[in-house]
Image (spheres, rainbow, N blue to C red):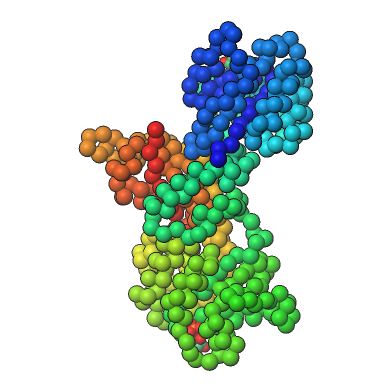
Amino acid sequence: MTFKVAIIGRPNVGKSTLFNRLVGRKLALVDDTPGVTRDRRVHAAKLYDLHFDVIDTAGFEDAAASSLPGRMRAQTEIAIREADLIFFTIDAKSGLMPDDKTFAEIVRKSGKPVVVVANKAEARGAQGGMLEAWELGLGEPIPVSAEHGQGLPDLRDAVISALGEARAFGEEEEDTDEEVAASEVLIGEDITDPDAEPSYDDTKPMRIAVVGRPNAGKSTLINALIGEERLLTGPEAGITRDSISVDWDWHGRRLKLFDTAGMRRKARIHEKLEVMSVQDGLRAIRFAEIVIIVLDATIPFEKQDLQIADLIIREGRAPVIAFNKWDLIDYPQELLAELREKTERLLPQARGLQAVPVSAETGRGLDKLMDAVIRTHRVWNSRVSTGKLNRWLEGILAHHPPPAVAGRRLKIKYVTQAKTRPPGFVVSCSRPDAMPQSYVRYLSNSLREAFDMPGVPIRIALRTSE
Ligand code: GDP
Ligand code: GDP
């Protein structure tokens, strides 16, 4: 299901120009034949990866050129009723006029989602009009130049926040998810969750799991984490257990910890037994958003540890490493430098991943560990606006453009972020098949650096530009 947009505003603000820009053809002009009814026309339109219908209201004012009410108002109301989203358009160059407020009132009464389009924003003096547009009380005005095609990336983002991702992309956009999935092996279920939160919400419990080889100190760590809070909150307060998870909070941040039966038994009576099975490990990773990998710092980085880290990254979760038993280390600074260097080298897929020395036994480093977990969770949820992405892209294209393949240069048109948790980007380009993996890796590293996204998987899907 696509959604329908009505472009509403007083005469001369640039509605037809915007309409043409979205529909991509000179339709309003082409259809401008006497006798043709132009009252309401609906046309397929596109704003980067958003596909929708636009209801054109450009003809209205011709029919009621002298004054606003009457037929024009009625037509506007019909268009609004039919629409799922309204582009309330103003002329930022001329500033607000009384008619703008009349139209705004109609729009407000409809209760429909609105994006305020501050058109002619490229014109000198448009800043004043932009500021006035706030007075309409319909939300943040998005500066756009319909005539020059400027500000469209931000308009796209505004549509998504007004409608929500699920509606903005409709069912058809499920294809995009598959493309993103196809680009990089496995994808966690969250990435295709149509109700995924567009912005970071730190009131929901963060789901974490603790994994690692037997004897690395998982149970001790969990006890230390939960036990500390227990001291603060009184016996058992704030701690609830169900079959697979334990809820508690860490200095006010709510957490849900994956808890295997084996772990729990051990956590209670401290007996020496039971390896967390591979199956449990997988379930834990799929359950969690952030996975703490506990390594015994006296015997770090065995093959199995790297396999687990790799699996976490492929599942789209973010790992945080705890170098445990740090109290046993004689030359901590030297070892930490060595271990961090190793981490970067062995796990380039999650460059910059957080690795924190801790002692589960003494409790040292646990605050830093949890800070790293929370920071990583934030990055995992991060969203970069299309405007920023495309400014970044301009720099990339200027300094390190894609190579030529078989004598023809590959072209990249634009980049959008299609998903969060973990961040997933769609790169629209000519001949995706020909794009070398090394260049995609370069884009991913550069994105990671430019937008400060250390330690989480980053997905890039290539898509053909038309
Ligand atoms: P409508 O009556 O709301 O449909 O407005 P039109 O699309 O017919 O545009 C009205 C006038 O504004 C025309 O002269 C357009 O060329 C001009 N216009 C439209 N968009 C822009 C813009 O982004 N910048 C500037 N400077 N002028 C624009
Ligand atoms: P698990 O199998 O990963 O759950 O590991 P345990 O939590 O049962 O710990 C294994 C052993 O390492 C136990 O004897 C713990 O007392 C010990 N241990 C755990 N954490 C630390 C630590 O930070 N320092 C030291 N010195 N020993 C630890």
Where is residue 363? Give x, y as percent: 58, 80
Please give the name of the residue rendered at 36% of the width and 51% of the height, measured from the top-left corner.
Answer: 441
Where is residue 38? Give x, y as percent: 60, 16
Can residue 131 be seen in this snapshot? no
Please give the name of the residue rendered at 38% of the width and 38% of the height, measured from the top-left corner.
Answer: 464
- Left-right relation of 42 to 461: right
Q: Quadrant location of residue 203?
A: bottom right
Comparing 399 with 56, the one in front is 56
* Circle count: 0
Please give the name of the residue rendered at 77% of the width and 17% of the height, measured from the top-left corner.
Answer: 69
Q: Which quadrant of the figure contains the C terminus? A: top left
Look at the picture and state if 235 lies above or below 137: below
Q: Which quadrant of the figure contains the N terminus? A: top right
Can residue 440 be seen in this snapshot? yes
Comparing 394 with 383, the one in front is 383
Where is residue 380? Give x, y as percent: 52, 57
Residue at the left extreme of this rendering? 406
Please give the name of the residue rendered at 58% of the width and 67% of the height, measured from the top-left corner.
Answer: 207
Residue at the top extreme of this rendering? 34
Where is residue 233? Give x, y as percent: 73, 77
Look at the picture and state if 189 lies above or below 86: below
Comparing 179 with 259, the one in front is 179
- Left-right relation of 114 to 398: right
